[in-house]
């Protein structure tokens, strides 16, 4: 059972607003999904620690510099930028 | 019966039966005519397509040799990064995002002069089974536009099934290539995890995502898979294809091949779907394959395990959409935190937000052990079960989806019921195995039914070999009445 | 009641690799904002991390130099939190399988500060607040860090200061970091609690974040100790919270807003594979480790007979120690080179950076040549000292600056002649000396030294002058 309070807490962690009129439906949906997910707790597992699917290890890169991208490209998709930086404008001032 | 389109077009280009520009124009015209009904493309790149086509024609005119995929018009799902071409994931949050780098798969195909017609529709961030969670509206089924194309790679399946692309690349996290391929009556391969680079694929669930081809024939799938699979230094989890190109063994005899049937795959499957798959089993018997029956009891946990892991990874992968560096940004806000929350709350659709919340929940303190950790352990158990199964069989045959394409707007309001439609496709992703969906019949309404062949890790050659033999002996491909008639 | 301080450290050290931890951008400090960036380190959708091999090696080096056990199997995890300086909204770090565990650093009072773990992770970018706008620069984003976490083993501010200095020294020695606190390549978080002396229960702790100077650390700890003691004495409770130290007001203040409940939701990063550390690799790295500063200092004291303060000064920077060893090798008395370096050469290096690189005007080889002239009795100490000053000024070799004629001391007659001249020229000094002002003789010695151009032995001249006056 997922409570309203838990949904609110999770929403804060997820950086999402949950509107007043959404909260009940969302809590209900989450509860249903979680109780469905709960079925796994009936399963006996062999306590196997899952690693990565192909058991790969030590995929490493040499420490060699590759030139960085032009700043124009780096900032190309930003809605606001100034002085070569990404910017969140203070729109309250 | 479906012959390879790619090889046929390649021959036509080489023999100058048709020029690449003419071919490309045909497809662009067809898109202009049919895309309104199919809603497959969300971005059309006619200009660059024609540029590439002309370059290919010049090459041919100069008497140079061209590669198999050179000049063949194709499409990419809109979660595969294309430098200079808008890549949206069909989400408002990325509505105007233009990547500054190419996904490895696109770099590979571009280097071979693949003609990109445009980017295709999908469920937002690949989360969904109908393509209707797209901010552009869902792609339609070319066999009946009152029905969905499936999801999440619905746009690719609709375009390829509707003949407005020769082939396309989709991505499959829990069935997103195979399910729409099944719904649209075409072929879709989810490769072994690590066979194809994920670099540039906008992540949904990193340990499950894999890029693969959607085509109208098994041969085309084999050709495209051979082209895109390979080691990539940009993706630590990508070790590449193992062994010879799958095209080499595509037409091998399958007498004596052991085809495994696990009864759990047939539970809850609609009767007509079951009947079609059983008919395919008989085709295999007639081809001299050995049918091996067994049980996979842990399969019943696959779906919850999938949703826990996929949502957990998604909640982390989608944290970066904060409006600062790219994508949609809320216009009015009080401070940085408020801007981020408004951007995300407005930019993401309902299903995406639901999965982010779910994923955050299963990872949060107090719940981690009961959900995420337990799911990881069970993942290990399911992997083991499949490994054991492949000791007694070479490929596993199962339905792709328990039903056929839903009606538009039928998207079930109950999320759990919707998730259940993924029941046959998710085990392959959990175990990192290759799976290919092949058309194996039609329901009473004429909607396609698909079956999937599942192989052991890196055994694409086996499942495609089995798929090709079936296609030749009893394949149920039927071209839809849209697009380019070749 | 008396209260005991209990503290633990979490220290972030930027590794001196060429490239970032997960992409091939440079780690160079400074640079125009966002010019050391690529799709990977600004977290563009679809990008994937690729682990830098040298980061793993450096972390193991740091672990071995601090007596840690090196894990055989390690992995990378995601630490999820949303902040504008963190482009992916998660930091790739290590949670339950750090590369190094269970080490220690020994302090001069004999106490061992236990190191709980050392793990690798990526740095965040930088936020600048300007007239209410927030500007973000990701040049630092993705620079490799090791985080060194100690047990709460500190009992005094002095221990903390010594620990930070030692850690800095070790990391520089083994070449994994320049540890420049003012540039942020070494930053400390300190956990502090207090308890009645004699108690073995831990009090409620606070954490002071991100301090980048040893002086601030000391001040902040002192302030926080008093604040906590005052709270307890006045019957109030210490609240567990994260604090920021303000070096202007010398106070600490709470850092987080009420909404930011911490829940990092760690899980294994599915984009990265397992790190296996074969024992052969650990041994290879161990063999490549240089002599550590503590060992070196002890050797200077035990084998070379240097005083502890000199040994400490010479081993504080690896380059200085290397210079000293090269200059003193094969000379008669290892103290001579030490005296020259500490007494004269140190005056020409001012900044930390200069001390670290120790590129001084006189090469170790040239200093050694000067010392051998002394050893062979060709020149005396005074001439050697003044020559070294000239060498530092001009960069010339000793043999270029000293004439053949200057070699060797003054003979007895010449010395006597000069002393006579000194006495004749300084009648007031003579009368002062005879009246009991013993220092007055120095003026005459100075005259002799000046007129012999430093060749005279000052002690001998003084003795001679006194004989001659009396």
Image: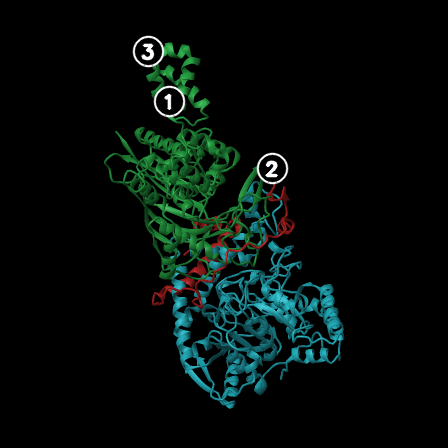
Chain bearing tag 1 is C
Tell me the residue that label 1 is attached to: C461
- The picture's colour for chain C is green
Q: Quadrant of residue B71?
A: bottom right
Query: How far across and how far down the image is residue B339, in percent?
Result: 57, 45
Quarter of the view holding residue C293:
top left
Residue corresponding to mark 2: A92
Drawing shade for chain B? cyan
Chain shown red: that is: A
Question: Can residue B317 be seen in the rendering of this structure?
Answer: yes
> CA separation, marks 3 and 2?
82 Å
The N terminus of chain C: image quadrant: top left
Residue B185, visible in the rendered structure: no
Q: Are marks 3 and 2 in contact (CB under 8 Å)?
A: no
Per the image, label 3 sits on a secondary structure element best described as: loop
Q: Are marks 1 and 3 in contact (CB under 8 Å)?
A: no
Marked residue chain, label 2: A
Residue at (66% x, 60% y) in the render: B85
Question: Given the image, what chain letter belongs to the residue carrying mark 3?
Answer: C
Do circles 3 and 2 both sit on a common chain?
Answer: no
Mark 3 Cα shell of 10 Å, populated few (<14), some (14-19), many (≥20): few
Residue under the point 44% across and 45% down: C13
Nearer the camera: disc 3 or disc 2: 3
Q: Quadrant of residue C274?
A: bottom left
Q: Position of residue C441 (x, y in %)?
A: 37, 16
**How far separated are the C-alphas under marks 1 and 3?**
19 Å
């Amino acid at each position: 059972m997922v409570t309203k309070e838990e949904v609110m807490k999770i929403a804060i962690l997820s950086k999402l607003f949950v509107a007043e009129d959404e909260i009940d439906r969302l809590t209900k949906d989450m509860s249903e999904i979680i109780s469905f997910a709960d079925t796994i707790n009936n399963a006996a597992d062999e306590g196997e620690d899952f690693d990565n699917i192909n058991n790969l290890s030590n995929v490493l890169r040499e420490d060699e510099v590759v030139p960085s991208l032009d700043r124009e490209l780096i900032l190309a998709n930003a809605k606001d930028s100034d002085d070569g930086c990404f910017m969140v404008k203070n729109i309250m001032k | 019966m479906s012959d390879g389109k790619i090889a046929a077009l390649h021959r036509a280009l080489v023999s100058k039966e048709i020029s690449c520009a003419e071919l490309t124009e045909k497809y662009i015209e067809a898109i202009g005519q049919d895309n309104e009904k199919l809603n497959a493309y969300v971005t059309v790149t006619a200009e660059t397509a024609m540029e590439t086509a002309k370059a290919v024609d010049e090459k041919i005119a100069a008497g140079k040799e061209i590669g198999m995929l050179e000049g063949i018009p194709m499409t990419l799902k809109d979660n595969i990064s294309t430098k200079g071409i808008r890549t949206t994931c069909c989400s408002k949050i990325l509505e105007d995002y233009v990547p500054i780098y190419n996904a490895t798969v696109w770099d590979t195909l571009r280097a071979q002069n693949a003609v990109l017609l445009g980017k295709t529709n999908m469920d937002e961030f690949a989360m969904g089974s109908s393509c209707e969670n797209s901010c552009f509206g869902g792609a339609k089924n070319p066999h009946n536009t009152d029905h969905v194309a499936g999801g999440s790679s619905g746009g690719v399946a609709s375009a390829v099934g509707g003949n407005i692309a020769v082939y396309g690349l989709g991505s499959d996290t829990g069935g997103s290539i195979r399910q729409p391929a099944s719904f649209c009556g075409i072929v879709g391969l989810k490769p072994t995890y690590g066979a194809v680079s994920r670099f540039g694929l906008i992540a949904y669930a990193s340990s499950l995502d894999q890029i693969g081809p959607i085509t109208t024939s098994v041969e085309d799938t084999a050709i495209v898979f051979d082209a895109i699979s390979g080691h990539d230094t940009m993706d630590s989890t990508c070790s590449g294809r193992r062994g010879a190109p799958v095209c080499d063994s595509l037409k091998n005899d399958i007498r004596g091949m052991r085809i495994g049937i696990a009864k759990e795959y047939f539970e809850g499957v609609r009767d007509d779907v079951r009947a079609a798959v059983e008919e395919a089993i008989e085709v295999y018997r007639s081809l001299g394959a050995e049918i091996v029956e067994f049980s996979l009891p842990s399969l019943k946990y696959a779906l919850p395990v999938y949703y826990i892991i996929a949502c957990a990874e998604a909640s982390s992968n989608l944290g970066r959409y904060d409006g600062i560096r790219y994508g949609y940004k809320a216009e009015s806000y009080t401070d940085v935190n408020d801007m981020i929350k408004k951007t995300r709350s407005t930019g993401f659709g309902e299903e995406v937000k639901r999965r982010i919340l779910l994923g955050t929940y299963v990872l949060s303190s107090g719940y981690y052990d009961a959900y995420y950790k337990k799911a990881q352990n069970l993942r290990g158990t399911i992997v083991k079960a499949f490994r054991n199964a492949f000791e007694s069989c070479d490929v596993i045959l199962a339905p792709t989806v328990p039903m056929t394409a839903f009606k538009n707007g039928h998207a079930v309001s109950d999320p759990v019921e919707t998730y259940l439609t993924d029941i046959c496709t998710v085990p392959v992703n959990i175990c990192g195995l290759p799976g290919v969906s092949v058309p194996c019949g039609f329901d009473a309404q004429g909607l396609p039914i698909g079956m999937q062949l599942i192989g052991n890790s890196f055994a694409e050659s086996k499942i495609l070999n089995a798929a090709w033999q079936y296609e030749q002996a009893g394949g149920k491909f039927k071209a839809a009445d849209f697009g380019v008639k070749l | 009641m008396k209260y005991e301080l209990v503290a633990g450290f979490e220290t972030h050290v930027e590794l001196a690799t060429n490239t970032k931890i997960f992409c091939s951008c440079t780690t160079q400090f400074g640079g125009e904002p966002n010019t050391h960036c690529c799709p990977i380190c600004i977290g563009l959708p679809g990008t994937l991390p690729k682990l830098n091999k040298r980061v793993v090696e450096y972390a193991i080096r740091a672990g071995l130099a601090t007596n840690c056990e090196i894990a055989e199997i390690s992995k990378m995890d995601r630490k999820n939190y949303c902040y504008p300086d963190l482009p992916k909204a998660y930091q790739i770090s290590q949670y339950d399988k750090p590369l190094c565990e269970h080490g220690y650093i020994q302090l001069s009072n004999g106490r061992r500060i236990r190191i709980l773990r050392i793990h690798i992770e990526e740095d965040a970018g930088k936020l600048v607040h300007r007239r209410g706008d927030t500007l973000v620069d990701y040049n630092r984003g993705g620079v490799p860090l090791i985080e060194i976490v100690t047990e709460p083993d500190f009992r005094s501010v002095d221990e903390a200061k010594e620990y930070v200095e030692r850690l800095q020294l070790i990391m520089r020695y083994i070449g994994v970091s320049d540890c420049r606190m003012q540039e942020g390549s070494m930053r400390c978080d300190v956990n502090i609690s207090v308890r009645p002396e004699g108690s073995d229960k831990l009090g409620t702790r606070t954490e002071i974040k991100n301090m980048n100077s040893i002086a601030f650390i000391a001040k902040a700890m002192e302030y926080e100790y008093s604040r906590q003691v005052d709270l307890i004495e006045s019957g109030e409770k210490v609240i567990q919270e994260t604090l920021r130290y303000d070096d202007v007001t010398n106070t600490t203040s709470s850092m987080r807003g009420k909404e930011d409940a911490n829940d990092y939701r760690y899980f294994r990063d599915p984009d990265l594979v397992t790190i296996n550390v074969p024992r052969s690799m650990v041994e290879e790295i161990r063999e490549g480790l240089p002599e550590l500063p503590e060992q070196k200092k002890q050797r200077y004291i035990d084998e070379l007979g240097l005083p502890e303060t000199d040994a400490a000064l010479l081993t504080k920077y690896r380059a200085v120690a290397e210079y000293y060893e090269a200059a003193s090798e094969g000379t008669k008395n290892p103290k001579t080179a030490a005296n020259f370096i500490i007494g004269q050469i140190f005056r020409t290096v001012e900044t930390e950076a200069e001390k670290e690189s120790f590129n001084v005007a006189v090469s170790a080889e040239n200093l050694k040549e000067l010392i051998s002239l002394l050893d062979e009795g060709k020149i005396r100490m005074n001439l050697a000292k003044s020559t070294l000053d000239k060498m530092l000024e001009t960069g010339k070799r000793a043999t270029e600056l000293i004439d053949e004629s200057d070699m060797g001391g003054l003979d007895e007659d010449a010395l006597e002649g000069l002393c006579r001249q000194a006495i004749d020229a300084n009648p007031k000094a003579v009368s002062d000396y005879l009246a009991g002002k013993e220092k007055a003789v120095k003026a005459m010695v100075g005259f002799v030294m000046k007129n012999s151009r430093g060749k005279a032995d000052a002690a001998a001249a003084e003795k001679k002058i006194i004989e001659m006056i009396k």
